[in-house]
Image: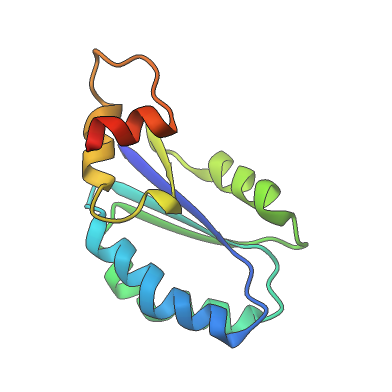
Amino acid sequence: MNKSIVTSFYNRKLSTLEVIDKMFLPSLVNNADSDTEVVIIDDCSPLEKETKELVEKHLPDLKRFGKVVFKRNSKNLGFAGSFNRGIKIASGNRLFEDLDLGKRMSQKYSVVINPKIFVYHGRYMEAMLL
């Protein structure tokens, strides 16, 4: 895998699941490619059953990626702890967080793989993409 996208969910309300269902997962499917690993962490959500069903619902679309990993934390680790777990699981050469999704993901990836660029960060990356 060249790219890994890591995301973490903590669903305590059905409205959160609806946003994931209607916006996030479709965006993921539409903006990544077959050389992308997707790592989804459920951060011990109270809505365990519903979260699992939601990911399973989108699994046929997500299967077009090279690899899909779905894990549930046994206890709530918070955003950083859960995201760090996802990073440990990820096997891609380049790591993206779910905020990198959208039409600019391919542009960001082209900057990341440019051998002339040693370090990039936030504003620098955005300036290059304008």
For the point 66% across and 63% down, which residue is it?
Answer: 43
- Which quarter of the figure has residue 103? bottom left
- Residue 106: x and y in percent read 22, 44
Q: How many marks?
A: 0
**Left/right of residue 44 with respect to residue 18 in the rendered view:** right
For the point 75% across and 63% down, which residue is it?
Answer: 74
Quadrant containing the C terminus is: top left
In this rendered view, identify the residue nearer to me: 123 or 47.
123
- Residue 31: x and y in percent read 25, 57
The single residue placed furthest to the right in the displayed view is 75
- Residue 113: x and y in percent read 26, 26
- Which quarter of the figure has residue 57? bottom left
- Residue 93: x and y in percent read 37, 31
- Above or below, comparing residue 103 to residue 56 in the picture: above
Quadrant containing the N terminus is: top left
For the point 56% across and 48% down, which residue is it?
Answer: 86
Here the colouring is rainbow
**Left/right of residue 51 with respect to residue 93 in the rendered view:** right
**Left/right of residue 70 with respect to residue 80 in the rendered view:** left
In this rendered view, identify the residue nearer to me: 20 or 57.
20
- Which quarter of the figure has residue 128? top left
For the point 64% across and 83% down, which residue is it?
Answer: 13
